[in-house]
Amino acid sequence: MDEDDDDAIPGLPPGLPFYMTPAGHAAMTEELRRLWSEERPKVVEVVGWAASLGDRSENADYQYGKKRLREIDRRVRFLRKRLERAEVVDPARQTRRDQVFFGATVTFAHLDDREVTVTITGAEEADAGRGAISFLSPVARQLLGKRVGDVVRLRKPGGTEEVEVTAIRYP
């Protein structure tokens, strides 16, 4: 995926808002600030110093610095595009807390009584290791709109599995 392509969010239909939590938006904004205001100026300084030494073709500081500048600039463009398109949804302001919506933390039980807890977040915030899944993921899509006690058929590579929603929480 080309990070510069604004519509290259996998599974995001054109026109669908790019949902983010306030925490995800703040983290992305901070990353943009840090890259643009702190890291990029330092790299520009190193590249300027390295360029002043003369022969740039064999100057590792210059070569690496230019490569790092391209990486920073690409990430900055990516972050700016995402932030421009972002629609911040604060799960703490959800009034219908009896159903699964964006930002909900959902616990569901498998037939063997094993419980799994996930939080439905924005695509850029998803981190399976922390239990944060994108609202675009198949599991999230199947959970959205459900209530405690609802049985959901989760489609998995090995077939389908029924789970029961046992808890829904919002911050």
Image: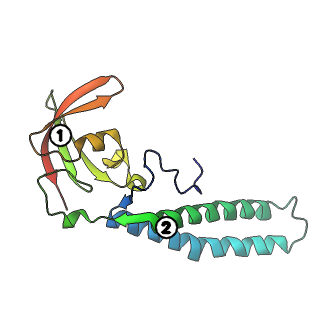
Pointer 2: what residue?
A: 31
- Counting from the top left corner in percent of width and height, residue 79 is at 52, 64
Relative vertical location of residue 112 with respect to residue 79 in this rendering, above or below: above
List x then y, in percent, for residue 77.
Answer: 58, 65
Residue furthest top as drawn: 158
Percent position of residue 141, x then y: 29, 43
Q: Could you tell me the amino acid type at mark 2?
A: Glu
Horizontal side of 136 relative to 67 (left or right) equals: left
Direction from residue 126 to residue 31 in the image, left or right:
right
Dividing the image into 4 quarters, which one contains the C terminus? bottom left
Q: Is residue 48 above or below residue 96?
A: below
> Which residue is at 32% across, 29% downward?
156
Q: Residue at x 52, y 64 (%)?
A: 81
Q: Give how far apart the Cα atoms at labels 2 and 1 are.
A: 33 Å
- Mark on residue 108? 1
CB under 8 Å between discs 2 and 1:
no
Identify the amino acid type marked 1: Phe
Q: Secondary structure at mark 2?
A: helix
